[in-house]
Amino acid sequence: MSDRLAPAANAPSGTVTANSRRRLGPALVMVLRVVLCLVFGLPLVFMIVSSLKPDTQIFADLESWAAFLPVGEVSLDNYTGLMDRVPFMTFMVNSIFISVATVVLGLLVNSMAAFALSRIEFTGQKVILGVVLATLIVPFETMALPLLWWVNTIPYFDGSQGWLDTYAVQIIPFIANAFSIYLFYQYFDSIPKELDEAATVDGAGWFRIYRSIVMPLSGPAVATVAILTFLPAWNSYLWPLMVVQTESLRPVMVGIDYFKQATGASGTAWGQIMAYATMITVPVLALFVAFQRAFINSIASSGVKG
Amino acid sequence: MSTVEAATHPAPPVVRAHSHKRNRRSTSVAVAMLVPAAVLMITFLIIPIFLTFGLAFTNARLISPVPARFVGFDNFVRLFTNDTFWKSLLNTIVFTIVIVPVQSGLALGLAILVNAKVRGTNFFRTVYFLPVVTSMVVVSMLWLFMYQPDGLINVLLAKVGITGPDWLGDPKTALFAIIVLSIWQAVGFHMVIWLSGLQTIPAELYEAASIDGAGRWQQFVHVTWPGLRQTSIFILITITIAAFSLFTQVNIMTQGGPLDSTSTLVYMAVFTGFQQQQTGYAAAISLVFFALVLTVSLIQRYLTRDKGATR
């Protein structure tokens, strides 16, 4: 998918530049870009900078540019202080485990399903694909409450009733994903089917073709699905809020609620909240900056065919 | 394909027998590969969708010793006579009606702005995209802080002589305040999608248009916009569904208040179905929500298809 987007990237832009230069003037365009850069970037800078300051100083600094600069009484006190309030490391480990498990299992299950739909001929194929695509317009929020009732009703693996308060309930419902199947399906369709024929002549079965031919050629699709699965898994909030009561099983996003409850007469501990927000955001921002091209391409390819 | 056909032609009977055997084996392999996804999707997607319809007509509770009982349209009667429901529905619709044009328009503007290949483009695109990879939970907390009566936003407004309101504490401004941060968070996502649409438009079209003497605006109307048709349909649908699903911001920043001025359908469904454990009632709300999403998707699909056919 990245290969498809990359070559076209340079094509029309030259003309657009020439035009913007003629009509708007490069200076105006640059001013606009910088202003927007401040609009999108400064709140995040403010978050990180505030996490390093005591609350009194955060509010005092609002009057000047100091609000966006790590000046004055800078320390890691907020970071050490919040550890008493929230079991941060537990939440972090939970979030990493849940996200990684969802991504890995999702890649496996969805790519296999897409492989069967795209490359093996069998009756009912079109119907199954149609059903998968039809579910795309159902937002998770529509069925979140019935699903909550459902996972509380069905038996767990050990025979006891209900899945609440487990890792499984945070992972398993999100493994199979219609959109991931669709993205894999599209990509697999672009890989020549002659390869399968050749492999069959050499005695390879379908599983072998999947594992040794199609998947190794599908790097961009794997990256796209991995990113589009990881982000919602890491960010998930509504679902764990409802299904997990045991503290030791909670993910990072739900941890934010600890600070809301702590709002008392002494006021909210904003510095600590910003420190917590920074710690659960910076790993993802770092991943994004490191794999920027893959991130952007995965979002872009999600919209190419609509 | 042609080489394969050529190769199979000389000996048709053998191949037929072979392919017949292969087809049957293929089907069983296909089934084996589909089973994990199928079982999971049926259990955690298809059944819950049908459950929404079923539970909406019962008095099911999340945790209850007595089994659920069929209650007909009771939940809906209760819902339609509840003021909070109508406010939530209105808020959800207002939020969507504002978000859809403003966010998609701004995203297109940003895309055009960063489509030019000049120095620093990559940097600006990255910065505009940063809020997208920041979770809505964090964004809500950050803006809750900035929206405080003595917070960053009011201090900045005071510098230009405006006395800012208590953004989230005033029913008149609370929904607007949530709209602003929602756009701030998500606009970069749709910028990238517009951008990929822009990059599929061949440069020759722009060259031809400028040879014909088309100005920048005319080029946009006659080349860019028609070229973005597919992209715009996708963007319209995704923004609409995301806007209807508004929950996280409300839950973290206002809990639906003040005076229900920021309550939404999903927020109300979670409040009744989770906090108050009234699953049946929450399913009724979910069903209304589902009907809304379905109606709008169908209308959008119909409208966009119609235009495409006449052109």
Image (cartoon, grey):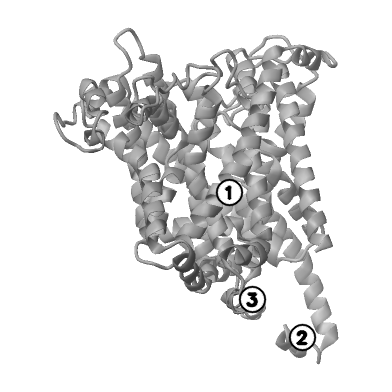
Quadrant position of the C terminus of chain A in the picture: bottom right
- Type of residue at label 2? Glu
Vertical side of B255 occupied by A126: above or below: below
Residue name at image x 41 percent, y 30 percent: B143
Seen in the image, is B95 located left or right of residue A276? right
Chain of the residue displaying label 3? A
Q: In the orientation shown, which residue stands out farthest toward the left?
A: A73
Residue name at image x 47 percent, y 24 percent: B252
Residue name at image x 47 percent, y 37 percent: A235
| Disc 3 versus disc 1: nearer the observer | 1
Can you see residue A291?
Answer: no
For disc 1, the marked residue is B105
Q: Position of residue A278 (x, y in %)?
A: 32, 36
Q: In the orientation shown, which residue stands out farthest toward the bottom?
A: B10
Q: Position of residue A118 (x, y in %)?
A: 69, 64
Quadrant position of the N terminus of chain A in the picture: bottom right
For disc 2, the marked residue is B5
For disc 3, the marked residue is A192
Seen in the image, is B304 located left or right of residue A75? right
* Disc 1 from disc 2: Cα separation: 51 Å
Q: Residues within 10 Å of mark 2 (few under 14, many from 20)?
A: few
